[in-house]
Image: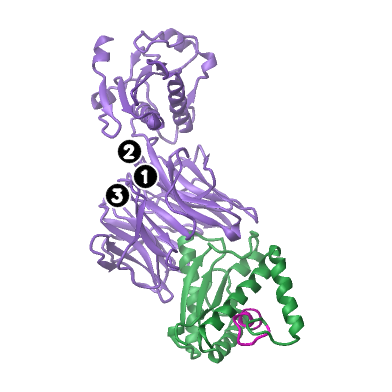
Amino acid sequence: MKQIVASFLTVLMLAICAPLAALAQSGPLRIEITEGVVEPLPYAVPDFVAESAGAQQLAQQIARVVAEDLTGTGLFREVPREAHISQVTSFGSPVQFADWKAINAQALITGAVSEEGGRVVVKFRVWDVFAGTELGQGMQFAGTPDGWRRMAHKVADQVYSRITGESGYFDSRVVFVSESGPKDQRAKRLAVMDYDGANVQYLTGSNALVLAPRFSEDGQRVLYTSYETGMPRVHVLEVGTVQSRILQGQDGVMSFAPRFAPNGQTVVYSLTRGSNTDIWAMDIGSGGTRQLTNAPSIETAPSYSPDGSQIVFESDRSGTQQLYVMPAGGGEARRISFGQGRYSTPVWSPRGDMIAFTKQNAGRFHIGVMRTDGSEERLLTASFLDEGPTWAPNGRVIMFARETQGAQGASSLYTVDISGRNLKRVRTPEGASDPSWGPLQ
Amino acid sequence: MRLSAKITMLMAVLAVSACTNANRFDNDAVDLNAATGQAGGIVPGSASDPSSPAYFQQTVGDRVLFAVDQSTLSPEARATLDGQVQWLRTNADYNAVIEGHADEQGTRAYNLALGARRANAVMEYLIAQGIPSNRLRFVSYGKERPIEICSEEACYAKNRRAVTIISAGLTS
């Protein structure tokens, strides 16, 4: 035990080094995230141990957020604390595996929290109860008291990663449009939140209509469309300073639907000239532009492949909205959607293997995924109006906006697994739309 | 017409449109009606003044409607636009902004582009009928600014529109 304690990695909030050797030897306790997983893995997470006076509440809260993260995936099921036999009163004490086996907790997460001089330290271990061994190594995170949720998310990301073998997505943020007011007088402003809806921060006022914010790959900047000048124009906002500016060099009547290239230097967007909307790219530094499509039809909603070599977009050149893929520099596009109905808002997955989209068919809206060649199309949701998917950083979960029907209709954010399971609403203070999921921090 | 007079007329349009949209502007409505009644004739800037934006909005007709996913002008739309052309010819010191809109049954970016197609169709028609292009511009709001809020075709049909908004010209 002393050896394990000695091997704790001291990890600062923004510089995480996962013990890769430990990940490799993950033993029998493992969830393979495939179509076949339907029975969630039972786990227990007792309150973390408060190792300093006053850390009691944080220790409880952090354990609860870890549990909300894990259970929220649908891959894990928490054994209720009322069922626990053992109480964990000291982080260093040996685990009573028999007590956790008796309640069928296959994984156990223990942790401790200390707070001193405005610095919070959270440490944790993951146990494979039935093997009677530790899964990976103990780890600790340090931060300020108001960053406690992030530390909890980091613990949960580690647990998720060690058990599934995939990277997590809990310590991530989502930029979106916060909505208030009735349908015919709706006010919209940009906001950013934790992936679970906590810590909402507003980035713009609601004096000008704003649409469709999109994170840069590093999560430092946000592209969005604003009517601040009276016309829809692409703006860029620095998240750290909350300063925004219009992108220079946009000619044409209107510009909208912007998205960053993976290099963070190029912005791809739609430009309307006359009745025609095409896709353009702009170098954000020089303001130099390049037209990527040239067709009399509507070309919009461009999204880069993660390697930056290709762009998927929607076009109605065939008569209805369909999805196309072209080289990032423009050129011949190949159609990839061929099913019934209309396809729009394609977004390339961070893994590069799939494209999420909105589909309209027979009066219903769906969020779906397909391979990048259009094969293996799978619809994940159905409702009056589902729209605008965005990928979790690990490519396993999709967030989107769902608007309810009728005069009282309002928009909310939902998440769904790419398997189509675990549809959940994300709690936001007001109505919400146009989510864009940022990177794992 | 002096700019100040045009601005007064524009304000009158705003007041009138507020009356038709919301009951809480009852007081304004009473005032306007009383003014018209007392004068017993044409009040400059009111909807009964043929050179007023209010007249354009209410009598000439400021909007045309479109079929689902279409931006072609129906015969009815062309008739309305012919009236707009006449008015804009007569009142040459006004400009116009054409706002294009879509119903809620579509995705956001596509509806922005579709609204632009509709607004542009109106603008091109007005230009073809002789209105100088430098008096006209357009903007699309996509599905962001519905005027009817039910989720039925009766509402959608009114939301698929292009509205010609009269604005004071830069030259007098």
Quadrant of the image for the N terminus of chain B? Answer: bottom right
Closer to the camera in the image, A418 or B15: B15
- What percent of the width, then of the height, locates residue A344? 45, 58
CB within 8 Å, label 1 to label 2: yes
Q: Chain of mark 1?
A: A
- What percent of the width, then of the height, locates residue A369? 43, 48
Disc 3, SS:
loop
Q: Are marks 3 and 1 on the same chain?
A: yes
| Left or right relative to B91: residue A308 | left
- What percent of the width, then of the height, locates residue B81? 57, 84
Cα gap from disc 3 to disc 2, whole angstroms: 18 Å
Image vertical order of residue B64 relative to residue A226, above or below:
below
Three-letter code for the amino acid on which mark 3 is drawn = Pro
Q: Chain of mark 2?
A: A
Three-letter code for the amino acid on which mark 2 is drawn = Gln
Cα gap from disc 1 to disc 2, whole angstroms: 8 Å
- What percent of the width, then of the height, locates residue A155? 37, 27
Disc 2, SS:
loop
Closer to the camera in the image, A166 or B11: B11
Identity of the residue drawn at 50% across and 38% down:
A421
Stretch of the chain drawn in magenta: B48-59
Q: What residue is disc 3 on?
A: A306
Disc 1, SS:
strand
Image vertical order of residue B86 relative to residue A96, above or below:
below
Q: Chain B: what color?
A: green
Identity of the residue drawn at 50% across and 87% down:
B93
Q: What residue is disc 1 on?
A: A438
